[in-house]
Image (cartoon, grey):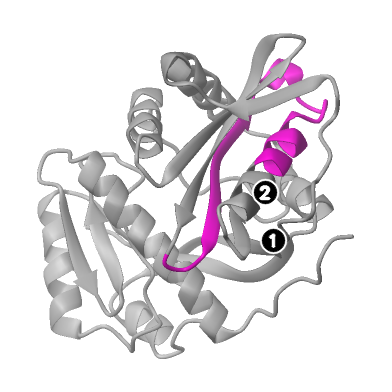
Amino acid sequence: MIARPPFASVALAARIEAAERDLIAEAVARDPGEGAAVWPLAGGVAAWAGAGSPLNKVAGLGFDGAPDEGELAAIERAFAARGAALQVELATLADPAIAPLLSGRGYLLGGFENVLGRRLDPHEAPPTPPAIDVRESAADELDAWVDVVVDGFATPDTEGVPSHESFPREIIARVIRDQSGGASFARFTARLDGAIAGGASMRIAARQRIAQLCGAATLPALRRRGVQSALLNARLRAAAAAGCELAVITTLPGSRSQENAERQGFALLYSRAILVRAP
């Protein structure tokens, strides 16, 4: 029996956003491109990992008051000097003073993403279809794991709202490779009839006791056969065994990933507005 979904309180959102803040800061430290920097900002961080990186953003903002406009202006200048837009991911449960502040500074709404969560029970064992073998990925198959995840990302499902951004394959591959190498990350590989069909990763946010499920993809030719659900179930078991209380996943609104997560007991907790200021 799947546990009742957690209540989406401001305190819970603050806990999840703190985990997201730490994930971005750690990822930049492992993937330091030219001019890489992480600036603290009102409980969150602004991160620059190099030109074109998906890590270039403000994350975790909104749960330690509104940002100081002087500090925010300095970060805006730093991004503008690099010829880059500044993207803020703002939770709907964040301080309500921040959205009008950003709007007044020229930020425009670029899209949304959903944050879903699920309580974890160490005694629960979600099933996996017998034809799919999911295991923690070995170090000697890192290249194959990266290839399958990048191939999956390169051909997204067409259901739901399309992403507001896209990145070159080589940048996605580098970020996925570097991010998954962190001590707090675990990689999982799914095989169907002996062949690699999909891959996924998970970050254990020990301080928040949260498992962040990320980097999941299935090869296009092998979709609709339960690979994503099998990868999700394997990570839920591993997260519960690691002592996490909550698993979270971020999806595009109305996507197949969101549908798969909800089938496995995840519930929508809140959304993030993507606010972008041109350089």
User: Disc 2 and disc 1: Cα gap in Å?
Assistant: 7 Å
Q: Residue furthest right?
A: 1
Instruction: Kindly indicate whether the residue at mark 1 contacts the one at mark 2 (C-beta within 8 angstroms).
Output: yes
Q: Quadrant of residue 45?
A: bottom left
Amino acid type assigned to the residue bearing label 2 in the image: Leu
Q: Where does the C terminus fall, quadrant-wise?
A: bottom left
| Residue 75 placement (x, y as % from top left) | 16, 67
Q: Where does the N terminus fall, quadrant-wise?
A: bottom right
Image point (85%, 24%), residue name:
130
**Few, some or many residues within 10 Å of mark 2 (<14, 14–19, 20+):** many
* Residue at the spot of label 2: 236
| Residue 153 placement (x, y as % from top left) | 55, 30
Looking at the rendered structure, the secondary structure element under dot 1 is loop
Q: Quadrant of residue 12?
A: bottom right
Amino acid type assigned to the residue bearing label 1 in the image: Leu
**Few, some or many residues within 10 Å of mark 1 (<14, 14–19, 20+):** many
| Residue 238 placement (x, y as % from top left) | 62, 45
What is the magenta range?
207-234
The reply to whether residue 148 is visible in this rendering is: yes
**Residue 105, magenta (yes or no):** no
**Which of 264 and 164 lies nearest the eye of the viewer?**
264
* Residue at the spot of label 1: 120
> Left or right: where does residue 134 sit relative to residue 58?
right
